[in-house]
Image (cartoon, rainbow, N blue to C red):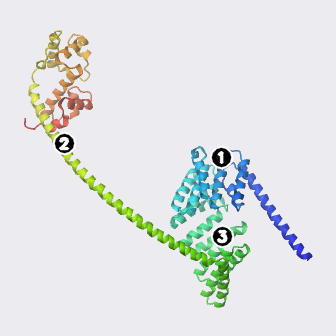
Amino acid sequence: MNIINLIITFTLLCVVALKGQDSIKKISLFEAASKNEILDVYLYTQLYKTGQKLYEVDSIYQQLNNEIEQENLKIINTIAYARAIDKLGNHDRALDLLVAINSKLDLYPAIVQSEYFCTMGSIALRSMHPEFATKQYRKSLDLIIDSSNVPKEIIQDKIIRIGVGLNASLKHQAAKITFERAKVYEQLLGQNRNSLYLKLNMALTNSYLGKNEVAKSYLLDALGIIKKNKDNFAELRTYGNIADIYLKQDSFELAKKFYYQGLIKAAQNGFKLDVFRFQYALSDLYYKNKQLDSAYIHLKLADSIRNHYNTNIVSEKIVEMDLFHKIQREELEKEMNAKLLKLEAEKKKVLFFFCILLVIGCLILSRQLVLLREKNKFLLKEQLKSIQIEKEPVHSKRIISKTMDYSQIIETLEEVIDKNEIHKDRGLTLEKLAKKINTNRTYLSDAINSHYQKTFSQWINELRVLESKKMLASSDFDHYSIEGIAKEVGFASISTFNANFKKITGLTPSYFRKNRSTPI
């Protein structure tokens, strides 16, 4: 009886000692998290891993939030908290927290933004959206890849996550290339907190690609890390995966060894469903090796666990759900097909009306082009006729004024124009012309307004356009470009010439020249 009491006392002391170690570890993590100068989210995620229930995780969050004063650390803590509660199934609450951060995201440092996008990627991956997750992981990496202030371990973590997203998207070759990129950091850093995660994913990727020996090598390396840093769940999966590979290669003894190691580990940790998996796998292994007695024993043990956990009922429910999903899927497909057919019919209607409108538009445009062509021909004929008339002296177009007699000024002006062609001077101004005929600018302006009913600018531009029409109408000036003619008659720029020519004649200079042979 005394021996039993001693054993119980010793066991309780061990439990207290282990809890004490966990408490010390937790306290040290709290201290590190509250002084997190590099804004490393890893410290917080490790703290949240110590909470198994939602209320425990909430308690850690509140405690940290009360102790942390710096705003950036509070945001990092919130991001880590969102990851933790999302893993526990609280997706909506996690997203609400991230939405609040998103409204001020640009105000935070790049590493905070990086962890935000990384968390969005993790939530998307768990929600079965691997391609969206990969995009978020890429954003996360791009924000910090060129930063000298961000530790290489954080950058390596983001690269690994991109590989995970690619694997989930069934892009295994691209995932392998990405993990190889992450391995470069392993060579620089040595074994670090990402090493186990990297090796397990490299093993999975190579297994997908049919490279079982390479996968096996990575899994054995992972076991070495697990022995130093305990991770029961990762260890179980590693044993099972290695054994599966050996079984594929008909290595019976090695497969049996790892299945048994996994079975013992699962039993020690109370993972009953994993015990079932290993018992069933051993039964299959013995059956393939024609050791039927051993196969039967392990099958019976597996069945006992199946019955204990009502796995048949679960299986039936899964089949029922799958059937329901299939029916729903078929109904949804029918509905979608009906909508697509309706949409296609509407598209055809829209296309039909569009074609009709296009034809009508083409007809209207053709008609307008014909009318424009006819109008241009008419204007061209009128302009060609006017060239003969406009060869008469300029004073023939004089309009007699009933006011002051400016005849002397006009007579002198027309004489200067006829003899000196001063209107072709590109620098000609009203004041310069007034000096030329010995009068002042006011009298000259009034004389032009009175006799020609035009401003000085209108009058001089009409004279220049008249000269240009003569040149454009004659083949003697074909060696001149239109710009050359414009400068020759006194226009300072081709744009001013084109605008005035079009305004006065209704035609462009190029059209006038091209169609000058039109019969009058």
Q: Position of residue 367 (x, y in %)?
A: 17, 44
For residue 374, side relative to residue 129 (left or right)? left
> Helix or strand or loop: what does disc 2 sit on?
helix
Q: Position of residue 304 (x, y in %)?
A: 67, 82
**Amino acid at the residue labelled 1:** Asn
> At 73% across and 48% down in the image, what residue appears?
66
> At 72% across and 73% down in the image, what residue appears?
270
Q: Residues within 10 Å of mark 3 (few under 14, many from 20)?
A: some
> Helix or strand or loop: what does disc 3 sit on?
helix
For residue 264, side relative to residue 486 (left or right)? right
Between circles 2 and 1, the one closer to the viewer is 2
Q: Considering only vertical position in the picture, is 148 above or below 471?
A: below
Q: Position of residue 115 (x, y in %)?
A: 61, 53
Quadrant holding the N terminus: bottom right
Between circles 3 and 2, the one closer to the viewer is 2
Mark 2 and mark 1: span between their CA atoms?
67 Å
Mark 3 — residue?
Answer: 221
**Residue 72: image tag:** 1
Mark 2 — residue?
Answer: 368
**Amino acid at the residue labelled 2:** Gln
Q: Residues within 10 Å of mark 2 (few under 14, many from 20)?
A: few
**Residue 136: image tag:** none
Q: Earlier in the sequence, mark 3 or mark 2?
A: 3
Could you say which is closer to the camera, residue 517 or residue 123?
A: 123
Q: Position of residue 89 (x, y in %)?
A: 62, 61
Q: Considering only vertical position in the picture, is 129 above or below 368?
A: below
